[in-house]
Amino acid sequence: MSAITGHTCTCEEQDILSLPACMGGLGFVNACESATPEFDASIKVTTPLVEKIERQNQVLPNLEDTRALQARARKDKDERLRKRLQDVKSSLLDRTRRAAELAAQNGASSWLTIIPVKDLQFTFNKPC
């Protein structure tokens, strides 16, 4: 992260930066923390398909069941991220906590997550 930020980040800064943009971070994924839960979610969602493949059954799993498993995985991830956000906020100093809360407000991250479209003249860089 120091190559991106220009200075050596503290643990608190790394925690903030690892949060999704909608929660006030930059979405820098910490693979050590996210690998196991993401793997577990993948296993849960693909289990019906794997069972069909193992049985050599050519009928695909029920689409509604698959969508329900995907929705559950998203809900679990959202709950995990919200808990992580609370843990990060509780470890911050008041001033830093306030800045993190402001960064997590609705719309605050829109400039980070928008996709610039040149055809519609939505570009964020100045012409040279």
Image (spheres, rainbow, N blue to C red):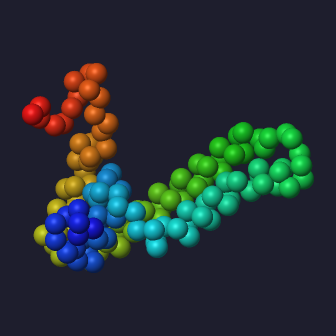
Q: Residue furthest top?
A: 119
Residue 68: where, in percent of width, then height? 65, 47
Position of the N terminus, as image quadrant, is bottom left
Residue 64: where, in percent of width, then height? 71, 40
Q: Residue furthest front?
A: 128
Picture quadrant of residue 47:
bottom right
Q: Is residue 96 above or below residue 56?
A: below
Look at the image and tell me whether residue 116 can be seen.
yes
Residue 71: where, in percent of width, then height? 59, 48
Residue 5: where, in percent of width, then height? 19, 64
Who is closer to the viewer here, 38 or 84?
A: 38
**Left or right: 62 in relation to 97:** right
**Left or right: 47 in relation to 74:** right
**Residue located 23% across and 28% down the image:** 122
Who is closer to the viewer here, 115 or 125?
A: 125
**Residue located 28% across and 21% down the image:** 119
Look at the image and tell me whether residue 92 can be seen.
no
**Residue located 66% across and 51% down the image:** 69
**Residue located 55% across and 62% down the image:** 38
